[in-house]
């Protein structure tokens, strides 16, 4: 299959975007949420797939144990604002595998688990009106940008990444798909301060002790598990298990070139140390301090 050329970034209401996430804008904004919908919101590469698979196992692992090994994560947890590359708005094939609003509308399962990378100000208002629960996952900026760089190298549906120094520079300027990491993590953090329906998770905490974070998630969602169920979820969301599982490792995605880099790449905290030079790190830290002065949000870059 011939793939369309890589998309270009453009400014969309103050946020850098590509058309795959703006083509269906009206339908996204008018999306009708249901009160029991659960949203998994993240800046790209912060642990979306990890928490999506965790929630899917939590809700459907018992009733449909085959689901996690037969349905790609993009079908189990549709990506709200996504429209398939190469298919202009209005002519899209609205199957569940394309993600998107239409797929979510048709989902029979309850609760619906819905993925989004939207910054908080772009979230469709129906989610707030319905008082839906939202799990936001954030990852420290250094590991986040490294993961994003490798993703853009291997995903032909993303803009050309260029070389590492220029990618890092553009990350600091917020010229990434879904905009500035700083605005994203801070915007959701502020929203969380007044909205108890938002659980703010950290990738680093998950990496440190996913059992403990699973317990936090269950308590937020009002779920209780038997010890056996709990062990099954913990095992199912391990990095090695998810890397092997073709329903979570994106090996079925035709836009990703695994010869360049796998989707489930390293899954580590601190991998940034093998990418940043000493001077890139110093420069980054300086800008980071400035951009994070007026927030109580704190990240760990190693565990
Ligand atoms: N189970 C588990 N354990 C540890 N790490 C995990 C796990 N699942 C996904 N990952 C890592 O998360 C990174 C992908 O992030 P996302 O799923 O948010 O990507 S996406 O935005 O949906 O494209 C990507 O990070 P990097 O390896 O650093 O590139 C994945 O490897």
Image (cartoon, rainbow, N blue to C red):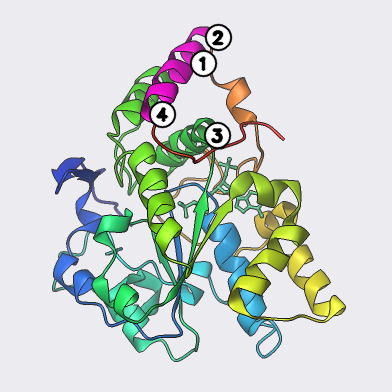
Residue 281 circle label: 1
The Cα–Cα distance between marks 4 and 1, rounded to whole angstroms, is 18 Å
Quarter-wise, where is residue 160 in the image? Answer: top left
Please state the horizontal and vertical placement of residue 97, each as a whole percent of the image: 40, 73
| Mark 4, other Cα within 10 Å: few <14 / some 14–19 / many ≥20 | few
In the picture, which quadrant includes the N terminus?
bottom left
Q: Residue at x 47, y 72 (%)?
A: 77
Residue 143 circle label: 3
Circle nearer the N terminus (4, 1): 1
Where disc 1 sits, the SS reads: helix
| Mark 1, other Cα within 10 Å: few <14 / some 14–19 / many ≥20 | some
Which contiguous range is marked in magenta? 278-293
Circle nearer the N terminus (2, 3): 3
The Cα–Cα distance between marks 4 and 2, rounded to whole angstroms, is 23 Å
Residue corresponding to mark 4? 293
> Badges 2 and 1: C-beta atoms under 8 Å apart?
yes
Please state the horizontal and vertical placement of residue 12, each as a whole percent of the image: 15, 48
Residue corresponding to mark 2? 278
Which residue occupies the extreme top position in the image?
A: 279
On screen, residue 90 versus residue 131, left or right, reads left
Where disc 3 sits, the SS reads: helix
The Cα–Cα distance between marks 2 and 3, rounded to whole angstroms, is 15 Å
| Mark 2 CB near ligand 1 (8 Å cut) | no
The Cα–Cα distance between marks 1 and 3, rounded to whole angstroms, is 12 Å
Query: Of tags 4 and 2, which is closer to the observer?
Result: 4
Circle nearer the N terminus (4, 2): 2
Query: Of tags 4 and 3, which is closer to the observer?
Result: 4
Q: Residue at x 73, y 56 (%)?
A: 210
On screen, residue 121 versus residue 147, left or right, reads left
């Amino acid at each position: 299959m011939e793939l369309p050329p890589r998309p270009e970034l453009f400014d969309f209401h103050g946020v850098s975007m590509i058309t795959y996430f703006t083509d269906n804008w009206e339908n996204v904004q008018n999306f009708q949420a249901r009160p029991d919908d659960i949203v998994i919101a993240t800046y790209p590469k912060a642990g979306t797939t990890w928490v999506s698979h965790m929630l899917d196992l939590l809700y459907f692992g018992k009733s449909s144990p085959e689901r996690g090994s037969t349905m790609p994560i993009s079908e189990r947890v549709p990506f709200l604002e996504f429209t398939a590359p190469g298919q202009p708005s209005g002519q899209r094939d609205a199957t569940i595998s394309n993600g998107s609003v239409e797929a979510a509308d048709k989902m029979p399962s309850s609760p619906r688990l819905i993925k989004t990378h939207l910054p908080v100000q772009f979230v469709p208002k129906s989610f707030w009106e319905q008082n839906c629960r939202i799990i936001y996952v954030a990852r420290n900026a250094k590991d986040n940008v490294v993961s994003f760089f490798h993703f853009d190298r291997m995903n032909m549906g993303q803009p050309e990444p260029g070389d590492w120094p220029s990618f890092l520079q553009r990350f600091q300027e917020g010229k990434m798909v879904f905009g500035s990491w700083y605005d994203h993590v801070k915007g959701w953090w502020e929203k969380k301060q007044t909205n108890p329906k938002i659980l703010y998770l950290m990738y680093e905490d998950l990496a440190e002790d996913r059992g403990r974070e699973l317990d936090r998630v269950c308590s937020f969602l009002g779920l209780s598990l038997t010890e056996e169920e709990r062990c099954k979820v913990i095992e199912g969301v391990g990095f090695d298990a998810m890397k092997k599982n073709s329903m979570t490792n994106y090996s079925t995605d035709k836009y990703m070139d695994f010869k360049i880099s796998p989707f489930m790449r390293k899954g580590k905290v601190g991998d940034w140390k093998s990418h940043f030079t000493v001077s890139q790190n110093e420069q980054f830290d300086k800008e980071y301090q400035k951009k994070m002065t007026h927030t109580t949000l704190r990240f760990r870059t190693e565990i």
